[in-house]
Amino acid sequence: MIKWFLSFQWKTAVRSPMWNKNLVLNLVIGFFLLLFGFYILILGLFMEKILTEVFPESNIYDKFNGLLLYYFLADLMFRFMAQSLPKLTIESFLHLPIRKNQIVHFMVGRTVFDIFNFIPLLVLIPVTFTIVTPQLGSSLAVLWLIASFFLVLANSFLATFLKRLMGSKPLIIAGIGILFVILIVLEKFEIISLSVISSKLFGYMLAHPYMLGFPALWMIICYILHFRFLKMHLYPEEMQKKKSYEIEAGNENRYLKALGLTGSIIIVEWKLYTRNKRTKTILYMTPIFLLYGLMFYPKPEYINQYGFLMFVGVFMTGGMMLNYANYAFGYESGYFDGLLTKNIDFKQYIAVKYYISVLICVICFILTIPYLYFGVKILLINAAMFLYNIGVLSFVLLFFATYNKKKIDLSRGGAFNYQGIGAMNWLAVLPAFLLPVLIFIPFKLSGQPNWGIAFIGILGIIGLFFSRIFIGMITKNFFSRKYIMASSFREP
Amino acid sequence: MIAITNLTKVYNTQTVLNINQLTIAKGESFGLVGNNGAGKTTMFRCILDLIRPDSGAVSNQEENVAKGEKWKLVTGSYLDDGFLIDFLTPEEYFQFVADIYHLSEGDLATFYADFGDFFNKEVLGKKKLIRDLSSGNRQKIGIAAALMPNPEILVLDEPFNSLDPTTQIRLKNLLIKLNTEKGMTLLISSHDINHITDVCSRIVILHQGSIAHDLVVSSDTLNILEDYFSLR
């Protein structure tokens, strides 16, 4: 049976539609993963050097042990946030004569193959040679490596267990969270020092090699905890708590309703954003977009880099709109057929999408006004970029949105989720950031950067005057593309 | 009136639809049957201008459906879940549809009163999103929304699927009533040959995209259909 499970797992991975459909994107993601792994490996290889640099006086072996507890706690937290619960659609197995234990063993054991478990090895293996072997000798060093790996696995079982626990017993999770906060506070005020505890703990373990059994024991305990919990809750509805909404009827916004069709489209779009997981993640991320300026404005070396400031300006006043307009139709893939068959004036419909884009930009621009604190120049650049966003970029993005060709699954979280994103979506982002810079370069070279900024702003205003024509062009393209969009949205 | 002329649709060299001539008169109750892959949904999608045919055209009220949009005002349709906005509550969805067709609050109230029995207290006032409802209840919402603007033509793809027996019977009676009393043109596909012969006055059997039989319903039709499908 395990053989079957493994093959199913392999097939779900290999046959996932995203994997097959988007080679370029996979290459890009693969490249970044490799690059990331490479950096981690470099960190591992130079850990000894780094520690000797930072702590020239002390024993780096002790120091490294001192870091371990931090690492495992941080790792646990990170996994709890980021690691997704392994999904095995157990419904398809529960009714078959398969022993429950087998299903559960597989579900728990599978976390071993998670990529998060192998990244630490890129540090741990080099460190075994550079730091641990000189101190303990090679045979104990290997034991140390194995014990550390057990702790990594224990973390992986524990994190997934805690994550499942959150659904049914949120109080326990809250308790653990408070414990973490207390630890951090105690550490902050130097009442206890995790680094000393960690160093002592791991030092003691290694001084008494039989104690290296404890990581193994801890791992087994975590495994059993997860296993028992799953076995007791092996019902689909208990495993995946579906968040269902309670919607009170009848409190529609009267002002929006007065706008007629425009209002009802805005209402639907707003609900689309607030009631779906993927779009909600994007809403949560917006404040982070808006804080982007804080990374650059306070630093004097950036304040004269127009290119940077323009980039930041486009991003802050238009980043949110970019997400909206780029997937203007893809987000509606779930009910696109329904829209097409209804008596909707699509020119007005697309105009509404444009108005919403403008509205988003206006809100973002207003929220960036406090950056005036860093100088009038910042405000003027942001204003110019804002005009560019509403007068040029939003039209370009909506035009490219008619090339949306992938059904977007709104029920999955949005961070690092590339499902439903096609090459066109990436292409459409290019004018967002390249075009202003390209326009700006000649002005910069001729020594008139301020005129360049002004010109970009004026371009935006000119675009606004032609909005009817642009909307007409988008509508025309929408009609010639609608069959292709509809049929690709229908594909699962 | 709906007229189909020389309509073909080809996917990867396989012809899934090939209809030379088919006319559905105003007020007719037209049933479409055929095994899986016969082209029923493809035909309905062509009628609703959801796919571009490789040749031929469909006209609805003398208007080519791919060229104009006036036909949408008089045509109600529900093919599948892809017609519903699933993150809305049923009430919010009905409100949206009402807004699109410029119906008044009063029209909406009448609609709720008319469909109270049909929903059987399982759809309205539940504070639930459409995506959290069962497939039967979603089907009810889709059919009701198609009927909301009082269309002259109604297109439903396998409307009896996943409905409970009570609602199946109610839907059957409702369709017969709409056809005989209001003269609504019905285009309905189904795998249930009993229901379809009860509702429709004309039944077309599709086979591999082409019309295999075009029958006027009589007391004999059910037997003909049974014979036809038991040999397939």
Image (cartoon, rainbow, N blue to C red):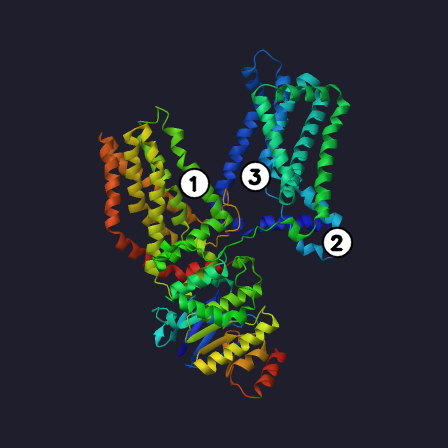
The secondary element bearing badge 1 is classed as helix
Q: Chain of mark 2?
A: A
On the image, the x and y values in percent for residue A42 come to 55, 26
- Characterize the local packing of mark 3: few (<14), some (14-19) or many (20 or more) Cα atoms within 10 angstroms: few
Residue that badge 3 annotates: A82
Give the Cα distance between marks 2 and 1: 47 Å
Query: Helix or strand or loop: what does disc 3 sit on?
Result: helix
User: How far apart are the two marked residues, 2 and 3, measured between alpha carbons?
Assistant: 31 Å
Q: Identify the amino acid type marked 3.
A: Ala
Check the image and name the residue furthest to the right. Answer: A210
Query: What's the chain of the residue with tag 1?
Result: A
Task: Name the kind of residue labelled 1 in the image.
Answer: Thr
Residue at numbered disc 2: A98
| Mark 2 touches mark 3? (CB < 8 Å) | no
Q: Name the residue rendered at 57%, 38% in the picture.
A: A81
Upstream in the sequence, badge 1 or badge 3? 3
Q: Mark 1 or mark 2, which is nearer the start of the sequence?
A: 2
| Residue type at numbered disc 2 | Ile
**Location of residue A190 in the rendering, given as x and y in whole percent from the top left corner:** 58, 18
Residue A286's tag is 1
Is B71 or A175 nearer to us in this picture? A175
Other residues around mark 2 within 10 Å, as few (<14) / some (14–19) / many (≥20):
few
Q: Are marks 2 and 1 on the same chain?
A: yes
Using the image as rendered, state which of residue A276 and residue A206 is in the foreground.
A276
Task: Indicate the position of residue B35 as horizontal and vertical percent values.
Answer: 57, 73
Q: Check if mark 1 and mark 3 are on a common chain.
A: yes
Q: Residue at x 32, y 59 (%)?
A: A347
